[in-house]
Amino acid sequence: MDTKYLAIDLGGTEIKSALMTKDGEILEKHKTPSPKLGESDQQDLLDTLKDVIDPYYSQISGVALSFPGILDSDTGHSFTGGSFYYLAGMNLPKMLQEKFNYDIPITVENDGKSAVLAEFWKGSLRGVENGAAICLGTAVGGGLILNGKIYKGNTFSAGELSFLLTNPKEMEFWGQTGGSKYLITEVAKKLEIDVNDLNGYKVFDMANAGNEDVLAVLDEYTKSLAYQLYNIQTLLDLDLLAIGGGISRQPLLIEYLRKNIQEFCDSHPIKPYMPLIPTPKIVACEFFNQSNLIGALYHHLKLTDKGDN
């Protein structure tokens, strides 16, 4: 019988899970609402994860977790919990094993690093020596591949792109203005409607239908993204940047992003004196918002010595 694993991606809005084979094939998918931020605690999260794991427990050989904290993915220790702030200082895999007597390996990897690992393993960054995944979710996640390996940094925080300072005067960070949540909020303001009546699907339905107000917001949003991608490219000189998150499924997003990158680089004030301007080459992530699940499994297999590549 083929070995199976359960991969779980903890997001601020929902928890996605997938029953997977060793080769990364998704056999079943499921999602459940995340415990409400600000209204939940460790126990709420543990109980929710138990409800996700238990139906598959008898048929799996391990659990691979992904969530937005800064963490040591070799030991499972979380320095921060991201939106699950109550996980700071905790070890989620050990908590699950001890609380519910699970006797199978449980591992955890940061969500941005999971995304880049998925694309490096089987997706749009396969074979790339130096690349990055930029994940546009509630905030902005990221992961780096340098010299053919995942780069985690001195304190495991490399790729935490939400922390990039974009407006020192207002103390704005990229996580506040770069995620899909910000795009949806700005569209709601432009259309003068309740943001709770919108989501990414509705925004792009209107954009693809030619709504000029929505397209104007999308243009400004991708222009701002383009500036930060240019900064990343200038710093690291990457082969390829893969754009992930649910909205990366939208060809219009990639189209507008490429347009604004090219316009910015073409109009760069130093171009007459230095023709070679660092210009990011971007693609959509192949696995979109499933990257975290696939990358978490890849990390799990490597850490438990079950990976073949």
Image: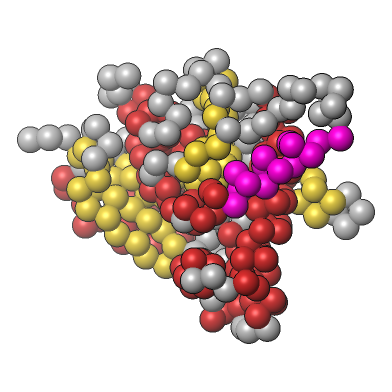
User: In the image, is 215 to the left or to the right of 99?
Assistant: right
Residue at 57% from the left image edge and 73% from the top image edge:
211
As for residue 262 lying within the magenta part, the answer is yes
Near-viewer residue (174 or 85): 174
Quarter of the C terminus within the rendering = top left
Residue at 69% from the left image edge and 76% from the top image edge:
190
Residue bounds of the magenta highlight: 256-269
Residue at the left extreme of this rendering: 1
Quarter of the N terminus within the rendering = top left
Residue 298 pos. (x, y %): 36, 31
Q: How is the image coloured?
A: secondary structure
Q: Is residue 12 visible?
A: yes
User: In the image, is 196 to the left or to the right of 32?
Assistant: right
Near-viewer residue (287 or 25): 287
- Magenta segment's dominant SS is helix
Q: Is residue 140 visible?
A: no
Residue 118 pos. (x, y %): 40, 35
Residue at 80% from the left image edge and 55% from the top image edge:
172
Near-viewer residue (144 or 50): 144
As for residue 3 lying within the magenta part, the answer is no
Residue at the top extreme of this rendering: 147
Q: Which quadrant of the view contains residue 123? A: top left
Residue at the right extreme of this rendering: 169
